Amino acid sequence: MYGKETLTKIIKALKARVSFWMRKGTDAIKPCISKGNRKIGRVMNVSLAPILTCANCKECKHLCYDIKACLQYFNVLDARARNTALVWSGADGRAKYFGAIRDAITRRKTHKFFRWHVSGDIVDLEYLVEMVAIAREHPDFMFWTYTKAYFIVNEYVKRNGGTMKAAIPGNLVIMYSEWDGMPMINPFGFPIFSCKLKNGNKNRTAESFNSMYKCPGNCDICKASRRGCIGGENTYADEH
């Protein structure tokens, strides 16, 4: 658990680095698209700055797993900041950010899986429009993400057919991230990802997790069987 002092420190560091890159300008920023890592396996992914791009993180930021990585590794913090600077830099910045993602996906010949936001979240409606467009452009890829930006996704669905199936392509799984003490508005039945807290959950009984798929901790395990998040199955992970 991170205290107020640690959170203040990391927020200050992230803001400073994002500002640094925004001053440099869009042309100077190289987007960071990861090919995978030890935890999530051979899964392409992209991330934004934690907390800064998470509009609904009041209840969970003190346990954010990405804070540790940003504190320990400057290259991680810098990569999050570069991507965030592009997203916050208007049309040109976003064009470069999403263009880099499209290019990386096009070059990928095997392990066609893409995770949005190891850290960070959907920042606005226009950002989600691009996520959906990329999924439709690459039906041979499987995309998934976790979000607490319920209000953005719900609004998108309302404007685009009124059902999850009509609005969201089948190869883009959006997991509504459930957090204890945080109201989750999910009228369209998006699958849920929950965290089983060490000290117990107020919103869920311990038994209620039995009906959910338990995250094995490595996306490669679920890729083969399309279980859990990849298959749009209600899933939980132990607090970590």
Image: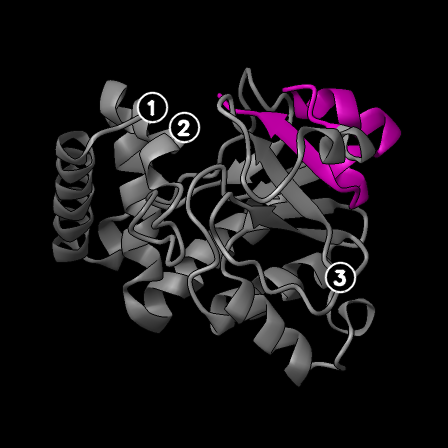
When the figure is inspected, residue 163 is found, relative to residue 143, above or below; the finding is below
Q: Which residue is mark 2?
A: 65
Residue 55, given in percent of the width and then of the height, sits at 37, 58
Disc 2 element:
helix
Q: Are marks 3 and 2 in contact (CB under 8 Å)?
A: no
Q: Quadrant of the N terminus?
A: top left
In this picture, which residue range is highlighted in magenta?
Answer: 214-240
Question: Depth check: 3 or 153 in front?
Answer: 3
Residue type at tag 3: Gly
When the figure is inspected, residue 179 is found, relative to residue 136, above or below; the finding is above
Q: Which residue is mark 1?
A: 69
Residue 93, given in percent of the width and then of the height, sits at 34, 62
When the figure is inspected, residue 188 is found, relative to residue 56, above or below; the finding is below
Give the mark count.
3
- Name the front one of labels 3 and 2: 3
Residue 110, given in percent of the width and then of the height, sits at 75, 30
- Mark number, residue 211: none
Question: Depth check: 190 or 139 in front?
Answer: 190
Q: Are marks 3 and 1 in contact (CB under 8 Å)?
A: no
- Which residue is depicted at the point 80% across and 73% down? 166
Say which quarter of the image contains residue 185. bottom right
227 in the magenta segment = yes
Q: Are marks 1 and 2 in contact (CB under 8 Å)?
A: yes
Q: Residue furthest right?
A: 225
Of labels 3 and 2, earlier in sequence is 2
Residue type at tag 1: Ala
- Which residue is depicted at the point 58% across and 77% down? 155
